[in-house]
Image (cartoon, rainbow, N blue to C red):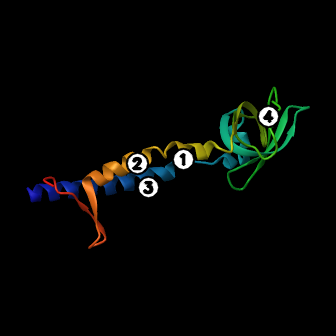
Amino acid sequence: MKKKKFMLIVLLLILLVLLLFYNHIEFGKNDYSNSNYLFENYQRFNNTEITFKATIKDVYSANHTILATVLDYPHTVVTIKNVTIDHHFQKDDSIFVVGILKGEKTVFAEKILVRGPWDDSIIFISSIPAIPFVLYLFFRTWRFSSKTLTFERRRKDA
């Protein structure tokens, strides 16, 4: 029985190494670019739908334009044009833009989503009620030994 278990572990490790090797080879063949690559090669990606995160630098509501800094390094400044600029856009807002690339560093926005200051915090706060449940599940099968200062598995007949 131990020999079968050992062979299974060896086969799984070999499979894991082969998958890692395959991933390493195939990753180099694909072009996983950031949004600055799209702006630098705008001739190739002109009239293409792109998405990126940015921070608003200035809002020009008269000509429906937003000047924003892309969050990917090296922080490119782009012009975002929209049919209607809502008044809720402010300087230093963090936004997510879905739009069509039109020329050098110009995007016609289809959607502009403003990221609120509490968006990340809400995820962490909403997971707090799960902590007691996870602790209960952990301590149901494990106990802390003060002699060895380690966690030990509880005996089933205890």
From the image, state whether disc 4 or disc 1 is nearer to you: 1
**In-image side of 23 versus 33 (left or right):** left
Q: CA distance from mark 3 to mark 2?
A: 40 Å
From the image, state whether disc 3 or disc 1 is nearer to you: 1
Count numbered badges in the picture.
4
Q: What's the residue at 90%, 32% (across, down)?
A: 63
Tag 1: residue type?
A: Phe
Q: Residue furthest bottom?
A: 147
Residue 12, position as x, y percentages in the image: 25, 53
Residue 7, position as x, y percentages in the image: 16, 57
Q: Secondary structure at mark 2?
A: helix
Q: Earlier in the sequence, mark 4 or mark 1?
A: 4
Q: Earlier in the sequence, mark 2 or mark 1?
A: 1
Residue 47, position as x, y percentages in the image: 71, 32
Q: What's the residue at 49%, 44% (across, down)?
A: 127
Q: Residue 132, which numbered label?
A: 2
Q: Which residue is mark 4?
A: 88
Q: Secondary structure at mark 4?
A: loop
